[in-house]
Image (cartoon, rainbow, N blue to C red):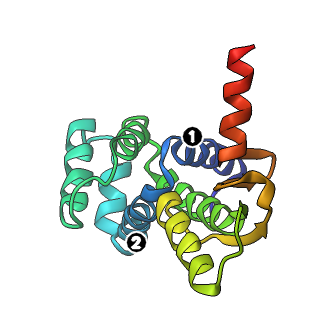
């Protein structure tokens, strides 16, 4: 169990990593953090090497790189940089709480993707499923899609997530063009 100070640091580091990752990278990064966490929990030799002051930073980093190599190499450069920084600072024990916090952030993110898609013509269930699949692929996670029919957009679609609106409708394009002409 991480101390209060460790938990605060873990939250900061995990949030920073989460913020620089693309949604399509979340699962790969989470898997690697889970693997490092597993190595930390399961191997007393690994823990000892990471916490032994007679082991140099270079040796610690080589050990971590060797572990990551067994799981396919680093998924993302910011993950490598974060882990190397934590190891170099002598705070290897933070890998476990960082992994836990990052996993929680990913779960929260995946549940929060509720999108409202507005289309000009009504769609059948196959059309709705296709939009959901395309958005899920593009955003790298599960999405909940509510489809709204509005013939006033003329064609294309709009996508709303919270306060953010992506307008790729014909009406929106015409409105933007009219604004540029004035």
Give the label, 2 or 1, closer to the camera: 1
- Judging by the rendered image, the residue that carries numbered circle 2 is 38
Q: Is residue 135 visible?
A: yes
Q: Nearer the viewer, residue 178 or 128?
A: 178
Q: Which corner quadrant holds the C terminus? A: top right
Q: Residue furthest bottom?
A: 125
Give the x, y percent position of residue 82.
42, 41
Q: Is residue 103 left or right of residue 42?
A: right
The number of numbered discs placed on residues in the rendered structure image is 2
Residue at (68%, 63%) from the top-left corner? 113
Mark 1 falls on what kind of element? helix
Give the x, y percent position of residue 33.
42, 61
Q: Nearer the viewer, residue 102 or 175?
A: 175
**Eyeballing the image, is 53 above or below 148?**
above
Residue at (58%, 78%) from the top-left corner? 127
Q: Is residue 159 left or right of residue 52?
A: right
Residue at (79%, 52%) from the top-left corner? 162
Give the x, y percent position of residue 22.
48, 49
Instruction: Say which mark, if any, is on residue 16.
Output: 1
Q: Is residue 167 visible?
A: no
Give the x, y percent position of residue 138.
48, 59
């Amino acid at each position: 169990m991480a101390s209060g100070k460790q938990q605060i640091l873990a939250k900061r580091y995990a949030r920073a990593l989460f913020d620089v990752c693309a949604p399509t990278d979340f699962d790969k990064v989470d898997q690697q953090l889970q693997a490092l966490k597993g190595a930390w929990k399961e191997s007393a030799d690994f823990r000892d090497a990471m916490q032994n002051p007679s082991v140099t930073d270079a040796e610690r980093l080589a050990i971590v790189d060797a572990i990551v190599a067994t799981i396919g190499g680093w998924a993302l450069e910011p993950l490598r940089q974060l882990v190397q920084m934590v190891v170099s600072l002598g705070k290897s024990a933070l890998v476990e709480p960082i992994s836990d916090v990052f996993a929680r952030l990913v779960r929260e993110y995946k549940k929060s993707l509720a999108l409202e898609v507005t289309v000009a013509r009504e769609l059948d269930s196959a059309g709705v499923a296709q939009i959901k699949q395309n958005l899920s692929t593009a955003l790298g996670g599960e999405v909940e899609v509510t489809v709204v029919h509005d013939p006033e957009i003329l064609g294309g679609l709009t996508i709303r997530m919270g306060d953010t609106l992506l307008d790729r409708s014909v009406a929106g394009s015409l409105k933007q063009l009219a604004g540029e002409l004035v």
